[in-house]
Image: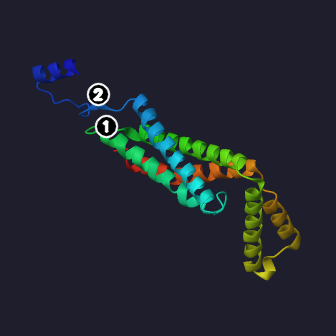
Amino acid sequence: MVVSCQLVTQYGMAPLRELPAGLEDNPSSGQVTQLALRFGVGAGIACAVWFLFLQFTGNNPFGPKQLLGQFLVPLAAVGSQWVLRRLAAPGRPGAGRSLAVGGLTVLLAAAVAAGSVWGLAHGVDRSVLNRNQAEMAEIVRVQQEIRPKEKRNKQFEALELRQAAAITVRDLVVGTFTRVVLLGMLVALPAGLFLRK
């Protein structure tokens, strides 16, 4: 850059391209990882606390009310992307770093949330898991009753009920991980593209 400035002053030419202000202040990959760890693990722990709250208040910690805690994950991903943008000011973090911090935040939160479901499932009495299976079977049964008669199939409905009644701990963990990743990425990807500048 020094050479181009000397050429500009010597020959009176305007530079074709200037380096963006604050380029040297752009966040490093270490800062991206640190932000993702803070926000991702924090959101995962918040999900775990929500699951424990559901358990201690007599609700089903493995049922649909899990989603209320999992909505924190997209907020954490956007928060990490926003902080990254603030760290890069007056420069830009770029799309790669912005998407990386959001995606890593979501993956870490999903791993912590799934691990907490696994721990909770192994720490509670078998009756809690049986209650969850019964609730899931009841939800499927109600959905089947709402379905129009021309779209009903007795064999398929029986299979749905058997699957709902046979949910395992592994199914709960994989389901939690998948839901958190999908929900988080659904928000983190567009937010990362928007906050790249």
Q: Which residue is mark 1?
A: 88
Q: Residue at x 81, y 62 (%)?
A: 165
Is 81 left or right of 106, judged from the image as shown? left
Task: Point out residue 12 in the picture as x, y percentages from the top left corner.
Answer: 11, 26
Which amino acid type is shown beneath numbered disc 1?
Answer: Ala
168 or 32, which is in the foreground?
168
Task: Point out residue 60 in the picture as x, y percentages from the top left corner.
Answer: 66, 61
Quarter of the rendering containing residue 145: bottom right
Quarter of the rendering containing residue 58: bottom right
Number of numbered labels in the structure image: 2
Q: Is residue 193 visible?
A: no
Quarter of the rendering containing residue 27: top left
- Mark 2 or mark 1: whose residue is earlier in sequence: 2
Q: Which residue is mark 2?
A: 24
Is 76 left or right of 15, judged from the image as shown? right
Disc 2 to disc 1: CB gap under 8 Å: no
193 or 132, which is in the foreground?
132
